[in-house]
Image (cartoon, rainbow, N blue to C red):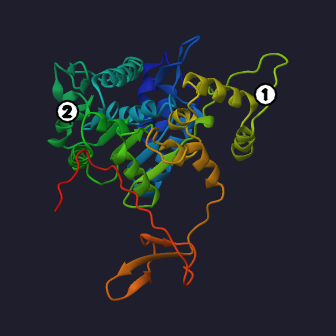
Amino acid sequence: MPGKIDYNDYNAVVKRIPQYRSTYRTFAAEQLRIPTKPPAPRMVPLCPFLPPQEMFIRSVEAQRREVGFIRQIWLKQRQQGGSTAALSILFHMAGINPYTHTFTATHDIETSEILFRTVRLFYETLHPAIRPHTRRSTVRQLVFEDEQNPESGLRSSMAVDTAKKINMAIGRRLSALHFSEVARYEMVSNREQVKYAIGAALGAVPLSPGTCVIMESTAFVTGAFFKDACERAKRGEGAWRFVFVPWFISPEYRVPLLPGERINPTKDERRLIKLFNLTPSQIKFRRFKIAEFHGDEALFMQDFAATESEAWIVTGHSVFPPMDRRKLEAHLRNPARYCEILPGKGIVDVEDGPLWIWSQPEPDGEYDIAVDVAMDSDEDEEPG
Protein backbone atom coordinates (compact mmCIF):
# COMPACT_ATOMS: atom_id res chain seq x y z
CA MET A 1 0.00 0.00 0.00
CA PRO A 2 1.20 3.57 -0.67
CA GLY A 3 2.61 5.77 2.04
CA LYS A 4 1.60 9.24 3.17
CA ILE A 5 1.61 12.09 0.68
CA ASP A 6 1.18 15.83 1.20
CA TYR A 7 -1.53 16.80 -1.29
CA ASN A 8 -0.81 20.50 -0.71
CA ASP A 9 2.68 20.01 -2.10
CA TYR A 10 2.20 20.05 -5.89
CA ASN A 11 5.82 19.12 -6.54
CA ALA A 12 5.50 16.07 -4.29
CA VAL A 13 2.47 14.90 -6.27
CA VAL A 14 4.21 15.47 -9.59
CA LYS A 15 7.17 13.43 -8.38
CA ARG A 16 4.79 10.52 -7.81
CA ILE A 17 3.97 10.23 -11.53
CA PRO A 18 6.64 7.57 -12.26
CA GLN A 19 5.34 5.48 -9.36
CA TYR A 20 1.75 6.02 -10.47
CA ARG A 21 2.59 4.81 -13.96
CA SER A 22 4.30 1.67 -12.70
CA THR A 23 2.00 0.83 -9.78
CA TYR A 24 -1.74 0.75 -10.40
CA ARG A 25 -2.63 0.23 -6.73
CA THR A 26 -0.76 3.34 -5.62
CA PHE A 27 -2.56 5.37 -8.28
CA ALA A 28 -5.95 3.90 -7.34
CA ALA A 29 -5.41 4.57 -3.64
CA GLU A 30 -4.05 8.11 -3.90
CA GLN A 31 -5.80 9.54 -6.96
CA LEU A 32 -9.01 7.70 -7.88
CA ARG A 33 -12.21 8.56 -6.00
CA ILE A 34 -15.65 6.97 -6.13
CA PRO A 35 -18.90 7.59 -4.26
CA THR A 36 -20.06 5.03 -1.74
CA LYS A 37 -23.53 3.51 -1.95
CA PRO A 38 -26.56 4.78 0.03
CA PRO A 39 -27.69 5.41 2.72
CA ALA A 40 -24.78 7.80 3.35
CA PRO A 41 -22.89 8.28 0.07
CA ARG A 42 -19.53 10.03 0.23
CA MET A 43 -16.37 10.18 -1.85
CA VAL A 44 -13.71 7.64 -0.88
CA PRO A 45 -10.51 6.27 -2.47
CA LEU A 46 -11.10 3.43 -4.92
CA CYS A 47 -8.42 1.36 -3.17
CA PRO A 48 -8.72 -0.57 -0.86
CA PHE A 49 -11.03 -2.39 -3.23
CA LEU A 50 -14.27 -4.17 -2.51
CA PRO A 51 -13.73 -7.95 -2.08
CA PRO A 52 -15.05 -8.79 -5.60
CA GLN A 53 -12.90 -6.04 -7.13
CA GLU A 54 -9.90 -7.39 -5.24
CA MET A 55 -10.42 -10.78 -6.92
CA PHE A 56 -10.59 -9.13 -10.36
CA ILE A 57 -7.54 -6.93 -9.75
CA ARG A 58 -5.41 -9.79 -8.41
CA SER A 59 -6.08 -11.77 -11.57
CA VAL A 60 -5.09 -8.75 -13.67
CA GLU A 61 -1.90 -8.19 -11.68
CA ALA A 62 -0.93 -11.86 -11.91
CA GLN A 63 -1.39 -11.96 -15.68
CA ARG A 64 0.45 -8.67 -16.16
CA ARG A 65 3.41 -10.03 -14.17
CA GLU A 66 3.45 -13.32 -16.05
CA VAL A 67 2.95 -12.23 -19.68
CA GLY A 68 2.95 -8.42 -19.71
CA PHE A 69 -0.53 -7.96 -21.19
CA ILE A 70 -4.10 -8.29 -19.89
CA ARG A 71 -6.80 -10.52 -21.41
CA GLN A 72 -9.51 -11.07 -18.80
CA ILE A 73 -13.07 -12.45 -18.75
CA TRP A 74 -15.06 -11.71 -15.59
CA LEU A 75 -18.34 -13.45 -14.78
CA LYS A 76 -19.72 -11.24 -12.03
CA GLN A 77 -22.89 -10.67 -10.03
CA ARG A 78 -25.03 -7.57 -9.56
CA GLN A 79 -23.32 -4.43 -8.27
CA GLN A 80 -19.92 -5.95 -7.58
CA GLY A 81 -17.93 -3.07 -9.04
CA GLY A 82 -16.57 -4.96 -12.04
CA SER A 83 -17.23 -2.14 -14.52
CA THR A 84 -15.67 0.42 -12.18
CA ALA A 85 -12.58 -1.75 -11.73
CA ALA A 86 -12.20 -2.19 -15.50
CA LEU A 87 -12.65 1.54 -16.15
CA SER A 88 -10.08 2.39 -13.48
CA ILE A 89 -7.52 0.13 -15.19
CA LEU A 90 -8.16 1.87 -18.52
CA PHE A 91 -7.98 5.29 -16.85
CA HIS A 92 -4.68 4.35 -15.26
CA MET A 93 -3.41 3.65 -18.76
CA ALA A 94 -4.78 6.68 -20.65
CA GLY A 95 -5.03 9.30 -17.89
CA ILE A 96 -1.31 9.51 -17.07
CA ASN A 97 0.43 7.90 -20.06
CA PRO A 98 1.04 9.41 -23.51
CA TYR A 99 -0.30 8.01 -26.79
CA THR A 100 -2.72 5.62 -25.12
CA HIS A 101 -6.23 5.14 -26.50
CA THR A 102 -9.04 3.10 -24.92
CA PHE A 103 -12.59 2.19 -25.89
CA THR A 104 -15.40 0.84 -23.70
CA ALA A 105 -18.41 -0.82 -25.35
CA THR A 106 -21.77 -1.26 -23.61
CA HIS A 107 -25.12 -2.77 -24.58
CA ASP A 108 -27.13 0.48 -24.57
CA ILE A 109 -26.79 4.28 -24.52
CA GLU A 110 -27.95 4.65 -20.91
CA THR A 111 -25.19 2.35 -19.66
CA SER A 112 -22.63 4.16 -21.83
CA GLU A 113 -23.58 7.45 -20.21
CA ILE A 114 -23.38 5.96 -16.71
CA LEU A 115 -19.93 4.48 -17.30
CA PHE A 116 -18.65 7.66 -18.91
CA ARG A 117 -19.73 9.62 -15.84
CA THR A 118 -17.40 7.34 -13.88
CA VAL A 119 -14.57 8.21 -16.27
CA ARG A 120 -15.36 11.92 -15.87
CA LEU A 121 -15.36 11.52 -12.10
CA PHE A 122 -11.93 9.89 -12.18
CA TYR A 123 -10.67 12.81 -14.27
CA GLU A 124 -12.26 15.57 -12.18
CA THR A 125 -11.00 14.19 -8.87
CA LEU A 126 -7.39 13.81 -10.02
CA HIS A 127 -4.99 16.12 -8.22
CA PRO A 128 -4.67 19.35 -10.26
CA ALA A 129 -0.90 18.86 -10.45
CA ILE A 130 -1.29 15.74 -12.62
CA ARG A 131 -4.71 16.27 -14.20
CA PRO A 132 -4.09 16.30 -17.99
CA HIS A 133 -5.39 18.99 -20.30
CA THR A 134 -8.36 18.05 -22.46
CA ARG A 135 -8.83 19.21 -26.02
CA ARG A 136 -12.22 17.61 -26.33
CA SER A 137 -14.75 16.41 -23.82
CA THR A 138 -17.86 15.26 -25.63
CA VAL A 139 -20.82 13.30 -24.32
CA ARG A 140 -18.80 10.09 -24.14
CA GLN A 141 -15.20 10.91 -25.07
CA LEU A 142 -12.19 12.51 -23.39
CA VAL A 143 -9.19 13.56 -25.46
CA PHE A 144 -6.18 14.40 -23.31
CA GLU A 145 -4.50 17.14 -25.33
CA ASP A 146 -3.61 20.75 -24.67
CA GLU A 147 -5.91 22.81 -26.91
CA GLN A 148 -3.38 25.64 -27.10
CA ASN A 149 -0.39 23.38 -27.65
CA PRO A 150 -1.34 19.81 -28.66
CA GLU A 151 2.30 18.71 -28.71
CA SER A 152 2.57 19.25 -24.94
CA GLY A 153 -0.38 17.08 -23.93
CA LEU A 154 -0.63 13.33 -23.39
CA ARG A 155 -2.31 12.88 -26.79
CA SER A 156 -4.29 10.00 -25.27
CA SER A 157 -8.04 9.41 -25.25
CA MET A 158 -10.89 7.45 -23.68
CA ALA A 159 -14.22 6.74 -25.36
CA VAL A 160 -17.36 4.99 -24.12
CA ASP A 161 -20.17 4.02 -26.48
CA THR A 162 -22.53 1.22 -27.39
CA ALA A 163 -21.47 -2.01 -29.06
CA LYS A 164 -23.28 -0.73 -32.17
CA LYS A 165 -20.58 1.95 -32.44
CA ILE A 166 -17.79 -0.57 -32.12
CA ASN A 167 -16.63 0.43 -35.61
CA MET A 168 -15.10 3.44 -33.84
CA ALA A 169 -12.57 1.00 -32.41
CA ILE A 170 -11.98 -1.04 -35.55
CA GLY A 171 -10.40 1.73 -37.59
CA ARG A 172 -7.72 2.73 -35.09
CA ARG A 173 -4.93 1.28 -32.99
CA LEU A 174 -5.97 0.88 -29.36
CA SER A 175 -4.10 0.10 -26.17
CA ALA A 176 -7.16 -1.18 -24.31
CA LEU A 177 -10.68 -2.45 -24.90
CA HIS A 178 -13.39 -2.95 -22.29
CA PHE A 179 -16.55 -4.88 -23.19
CA SER A 180 -19.14 -4.24 -20.46
CA GLU A 181 -22.18 -6.51 -19.90
CA VAL A 182 -21.24 -8.62 -22.92
CA ALA A 183 -24.03 -11.14 -22.27
CA ARG A 184 -26.56 -8.42 -23.07
CA TYR A 185 -25.11 -7.52 -26.48
CA GLU A 186 -27.31 -10.18 -28.06
CA MET A 187 -30.37 -8.24 -26.94
CA VAL A 188 -29.63 -5.80 -29.78
CA SER A 189 -27.72 -8.05 -32.22
CA ASN A 190 -27.65 -11.75 -32.99
CA ARG A 191 -24.80 -13.99 -31.90
CA GLU A 192 -22.95 -13.96 -35.22
CA GLN A 193 -23.05 -10.15 -35.38
CA VAL A 194 -21.72 -9.91 -31.82
CA LYS A 195 -18.99 -12.43 -32.60
CA TYR A 196 -17.94 -10.53 -35.73
CA ALA A 197 -18.02 -7.09 -34.08
CA ILE A 198 -15.97 -8.15 -31.05
CA GLY A 199 -13.54 -10.08 -33.21
CA ALA A 200 -13.03 -7.08 -35.49
CA ALA A 201 -12.52 -4.75 -32.52
CA LEU A 202 -9.96 -7.11 -30.96
CA GLY A 203 -7.90 -6.65 -34.09
CA ALA A 204 -7.32 -3.03 -33.03
CA VAL A 205 -5.43 -4.16 -29.88
CA PRO A 206 -2.13 -5.91 -30.54
CA LEU A 207 -1.31 -8.93 -28.41
CA SER A 208 1.73 -7.26 -26.92
CA PRO A 209 2.96 -6.09 -23.49
CA GLY A 210 1.14 -3.09 -22.07
CA THR A 211 -2.18 -3.81 -23.81
CA CYS A 212 -5.45 -4.71 -22.12
CA VAL A 213 -8.78 -6.31 -23.03
CA ILE A 214 -11.44 -6.98 -20.41
CA MET A 215 -14.80 -8.64 -20.99
CA GLU A 216 -17.10 -8.46 -17.98
CA SER A 217 -20.75 -9.28 -17.52
CA THR A 218 -23.42 -10.77 -15.40
CA ALA A 219 -25.04 -13.84 -16.95
CA PHE A 220 -28.10 -13.29 -19.14
CA VAL A 221 -30.52 -15.52 -20.97
CA THR A 222 -29.37 -14.34 -24.43
CA GLY A 223 -25.66 -14.37 -23.64
CA ALA A 224 -24.58 -17.38 -25.71
CA PHE A 225 -21.44 -15.64 -27.02
CA PHE A 226 -20.28 -14.60 -23.56
CA LYS A 227 -21.03 -18.03 -22.09
CA ASP A 228 -18.95 -19.63 -24.83
CA ALA A 229 -16.13 -17.15 -24.18
CA CYS A 230 -16.19 -18.04 -20.47
CA GLU A 231 -16.04 -21.76 -21.22
CA ARG A 232 -13.11 -21.30 -23.59
CA ALA A 233 -11.21 -19.21 -21.06
CA LYS A 234 -11.83 -21.83 -18.34
CA ARG A 235 -10.38 -24.48 -20.66
CA GLY A 236 -7.27 -22.35 -21.12
CA GLU A 237 -7.84 -21.65 -24.80
CA GLY A 238 -5.83 -18.65 -25.93
CA ALA A 239 -4.57 -15.88 -23.67
CA TRP A 240 -7.77 -15.32 -21.71
CA ARG A 241 -7.99 -15.61 -17.92
CA PHE A 242 -11.37 -16.38 -16.36
CA VAL A 243 -12.59 -15.01 -13.03
CA PHE A 244 -15.89 -15.91 -11.36
CA VAL A 245 -17.04 -14.08 -8.22
CA PRO A 246 -20.04 -15.55 -6.30
CA TRP A 247 -22.65 -13.27 -4.77
CA PHE A 248 -21.77 -14.00 -1.14
CA ILE A 249 -18.28 -12.46 -1.56
CA SER A 250 -19.95 -9.02 -1.58
CA PRO A 251 -20.17 -7.74 2.03
CA GLU A 252 -23.29 -5.65 1.34
CA TYR A 253 -25.29 -8.76 0.42
CA ARG A 254 -26.39 -9.29 3.99
CA VAL A 255 -29.46 -8.30 5.99
CA PRO A 256 -28.72 -7.98 9.74
CA LEU A 257 -30.91 -9.99 12.07
CA LEU A 258 -33.16 -8.11 14.47
CA PRO A 259 -32.53 -8.45 18.21
CA GLY A 260 -33.57 -11.94 19.23
CA GLU A 261 -34.27 -13.02 15.63
CA ARG A 262 -33.23 -16.52 14.64
CA ILE A 263 -32.95 -18.10 11.22
CA ASN A 264 -34.27 -21.65 10.96
CA PRO A 265 -32.72 -22.85 7.71
CA THR A 266 -34.55 -25.12 5.33
CA LYS A 267 -32.96 -28.34 4.10
CA ASP A 268 -31.70 -26.59 0.97
CA GLU A 269 -30.40 -23.64 3.00
CA ARG A 270 -28.53 -26.01 5.30
CA ARG A 271 -26.82 -27.47 2.26
CA LEU A 272 -25.84 -23.96 1.07
CA ILE A 273 -24.53 -23.07 4.53
CA LYS A 274 -22.39 -26.19 4.52
CA LEU A 275 -21.13 -25.66 0.96
CA PHE A 276 -20.40 -21.93 1.12
CA ASN A 277 -20.18 -21.17 4.85
CA LEU A 278 -23.07 -18.70 4.61
CA THR A 279 -24.05 -16.66 7.66
CA PRO A 280 -27.60 -16.13 8.96
CA SER A 281 -27.55 -12.55 7.61
CA GLN A 282 -26.65 -13.87 4.15
CA ILE A 283 -29.47 -16.42 4.30
CA LYS A 284 -31.85 -13.60 5.27
CA PHE A 285 -30.65 -11.52 2.30
CA ARG A 286 -31.18 -14.49 0.01
CA ARG A 287 -34.72 -15.01 1.30
CA PHE A 288 -35.59 -11.32 0.85
CA LYS A 289 -34.25 -11.22 -2.72
CA ILE A 290 -36.08 -14.41 -3.70
CA ALA A 291 -39.26 -12.82 -2.32
CA GLU A 292 -38.60 -9.79 -4.56
CA PHE A 293 -38.45 -12.23 -7.49
CA HIS A 294 -41.95 -13.46 -6.51
CA GLY A 295 -40.49 -16.63 -5.04
CA ASP A 296 -38.66 -17.61 -8.24
CA GLU A 297 -35.38 -19.03 -6.94
CA ALA A 298 -34.10 -19.57 -10.48
CA LEU A 299 -34.27 -15.82 -11.14
CA PHE A 300 -32.29 -15.18 -7.97
CA MET A 301 -29.67 -17.73 -9.01
CA GLN A 302 -29.28 -16.08 -12.42
CA ASP A 303 -28.59 -12.63 -10.89
CA PHE A 304 -26.92 -13.81 -7.66
CA ALA A 305 -25.10 -17.01 -8.52
CA ALA A 306 -23.15 -19.07 -6.00
CA THR A 307 -21.53 -21.17 -8.74
CA GLU A 308 -20.79 -20.72 -12.42
CA SER A 309 -23.47 -23.24 -13.43
CA GLU A 310 -26.10 -21.33 -11.43
CA ALA A 311 -25.26 -18.15 -13.33
CA TRP A 312 -26.31 -19.72 -16.62
CA ILE A 313 -29.69 -21.04 -15.53
CA VAL A 314 -32.12 -20.24 -18.34
CA THR A 315 -35.53 -19.72 -16.83
CA GLY A 316 -38.48 -20.93 -18.85
CA HIS A 317 -36.45 -23.26 -21.09
CA SER A 318 -35.44 -26.07 -18.72
CA VAL A 319 -37.05 -29.50 -18.82
CA PHE A 320 -35.80 -30.19 -15.29
CA PRO A 321 -36.33 -27.67 -12.47
CA PRO A 322 -33.08 -25.72 -11.78
CA MET A 323 -33.15 -26.54 -8.07
CA ASP A 324 -33.38 -30.27 -8.81
CA ARG A 325 -30.40 -30.00 -11.15
CA ARG A 326 -28.40 -28.13 -8.52
CA LYS A 327 -29.03 -30.87 -5.93
CA LEU A 328 -27.91 -33.53 -8.41
CA GLU A 329 -24.65 -31.65 -9.08
CA ALA A 330 -23.37 -32.77 -5.68
CA HIS A 331 -23.26 -36.34 -7.03
CA LEU A 332 -21.45 -35.58 -10.29
CA ARG A 333 -18.27 -37.47 -11.11
CA ASN A 334 -15.81 -37.19 -14.00
CA PRO A 335 -16.18 -39.50 -17.01
CA ALA A 336 -14.08 -42.65 -17.12
CA ARG A 337 -13.14 -42.01 -20.76
CA TYR A 338 -12.99 -39.08 -23.18
CA CYS A 339 -13.40 -40.36 -26.71
CA GLU A 340 -14.14 -39.59 -30.33
CA ILE A 341 -15.73 -41.70 -33.07
CA LEU A 342 -13.31 -41.99 -36.00
CA PRO A 343 -14.17 -43.54 -39.41
CA GLY A 344 -12.81 -47.06 -39.67
CA LYS A 345 -11.55 -47.04 -36.08
CA GLY A 346 -14.71 -46.72 -34.02
CA ILE A 347 -14.49 -45.25 -30.51
CA VAL A 348 -10.98 -44.00 -29.76
CA ASP A 349 -9.71 -42.44 -26.52
CA VAL A 350 -8.85 -38.78 -27.16
CA GLU A 351 -7.88 -36.16 -24.58
CA ASP A 352 -10.81 -33.72 -24.19
CA GLY A 353 -12.79 -35.72 -26.75
CA PRO A 354 -16.46 -34.80 -27.29
CA LEU A 355 -17.79 -38.30 -26.42
CA TRP A 356 -17.80 -38.92 -22.69
CA ILE A 357 -18.20 -42.43 -21.25
CA TRP A 358 -18.90 -43.03 -17.58
CA SER A 359 -19.33 -46.80 -17.80
CA GLN A 360 -19.17 -49.36 -20.59
CA PRO A 361 -22.46 -50.61 -22.08
CA GLU A 362 -23.53 -54.07 -21.04
CA PRO A 363 -24.17 -56.73 -23.72
CA ASP A 364 -27.86 -57.33 -24.45
CA GLY A 365 -28.78 -54.21 -22.43
CA GLU A 366 -31.46 -51.80 -23.61
CA TYR A 367 -30.57 -48.11 -23.76
CA ASP A 368 -32.29 -44.84 -24.56
CA ILE A 369 -30.66 -42.04 -26.52
CA ALA A 370 -31.40 -38.35 -26.01
CA VAL A 371 -30.43 -35.38 -28.16
CA ASP A 372 -30.17 -31.76 -27.01
CA VAL A 373 -31.36 -29.55 -29.87
CA ALA A 374 -29.51 -26.34 -28.97
CA MET A 375 -31.30 -23.03 -29.50
CA ASP A 376 -28.28 -21.41 -31.09
CA SER A 377 -29.85 -19.60 -34.04
CA ASP A 378 -32.44 -16.90 -34.44
CA GLU A 379 -33.97 -18.68 -37.43
CA ASP A 380 -34.56 -22.29 -38.29
CA GLU A 381 -32.24 -23.51 -40.98
CA GLU A 382 -33.73 -24.56 -44.26
CA PRO A 383 -33.57 -28.32 -44.83
CA GLY A 384 -30.70 -29.38 -47.03
Residue in the picture at 46% in, 25% down? 31
Q: Secondary structure at mark 1?
A: loop
Q: Nearer the viewer, mark 1 or mark 2?
A: 1
Residue under circle 1? 263
**10 lies left or right of 54:** left
Residue 198 appears left or right of 353: left
- Find residue 24 and report its horizontal and vertical position in percent: 46, 38
Residue indicated by mark 2: 165
- When the figure is inspected, residue 288 is found, relative to residue 189, above or below; the finding is above
Which quadrant would residue 220 be assigned to in this image?
top left
**Quarter in which the N terminus is drawn:** top right
Figure check: 329 above or below 259 = below
Q: Secondary structure at mark 2?
A: helix
Quadrant for residue 373, please give it. bottom left
Tell me the crowding category of disc 2: few under 14, some 14 to 19, or many 20 or more residues within 10 angstroms, Cα based.
Answer: few
State the separation of the CA atoms marked 1 and 2.
50 Å
Name the foreground residue: 123 vs 351: 351
Foreground of the two, 125 or 332: 332
Residue 283 visible within the image = yes
Q: Is residue 52 above or below residue 329?
A: above
- Where 332 sits versus 210, above or below? below
| Residue under the image location 27 percent in, 38 percent down | 100
Coordinates of residue 138 in the picture (x, y in percent): 22, 19
Q: Which mark is residue 25?
A: none
